[in-house]
Amino acid sequence: KAALASLDPRSRRIVEARWLREKNAATLHDLAAEFKVSAERIRQIEAKALEKMKKVMQFGAGGAATPLAPPRTPQASPAGREALASVL
């Protein structure tokens, strides 16, 4: 519910009409006619809304990740360092 609530009204309407109806899910063309835009624009809005919802579900409404472990710093192997040094 928090993910859906994070969307603007138009995006929420599109996601609800395309994914949350049990019967008669709206087509891109149905929604394009309703919003007076192209079906491609509806697809773009839907894709952006789904990505936003995914981030909210993953990281919370604030958008900040709570890492479970500290990030790793990649370490070059001795051979990799030698190869890099010879190029530079």
Image (cartoon, rainbow, N blue to C red):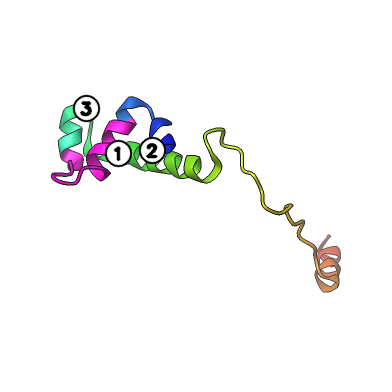
Q: Height in image: 71 above or below 83?
A: above
Tell me the SS state at disc 2: helix
Give the residue drawn at x 72%, y 53%: 71
Residue 76, position in %: x, y?
A: 80, 65
Q: Secondary structure at mark 1?
A: helix
At x 21%, y 27%, the residue is 35
Foreground pick, 11 / 74: 11
Q: Is residue 20 left or right of residue 1?
A: left
Categorize mark 3 by other alpha carbons within 10 Å: few (<14), some (14-19), many (20+).
some
Identify residue type, mark 3.
Answer: Phe
* Amino acid, disc 2: Ala
In the rendered view, tell whether residue 65 sits above or below residue 12. below
In the figure, is residue 44 to the left or right of 62?
Answer: left
Foreground tag (2 vs 3)? 2
List the residue tagged with mark 2.
49
The residue carrying mark 3 is: 35
Classify residue 54 by image quadrant: top left
Report the amino acid beneath label 1: Val
Q: Residue 36, percent across and down?
A: 19, 27
* Residue 60 x %, y %: 53, 38
The x, y position of residue 10, in whole percent, is: 30, 28
Stretch in magenta:
11-29
- For marks 3 and 1, the one nearer the N-term is 1
Q: In 3D space, how far apart are the residues under numbered discs 2 and 1 (Cα atoms)?
A: 7 Å
Q: Is residue 57 magenta?
A: no
Q: Which mark is residue 15?
A: 1
Estimate how packed mark 2 is, as few (under 14), some (14 to 19) or many (20 or more) residues with alpha carbons within 10 Å.
Answer: many
Q: Earlier in the sequence, mark 2 or mark 3?
A: 3
Q: Are marks 2 and 1 in contact (CB under 8 Å)?
A: yes
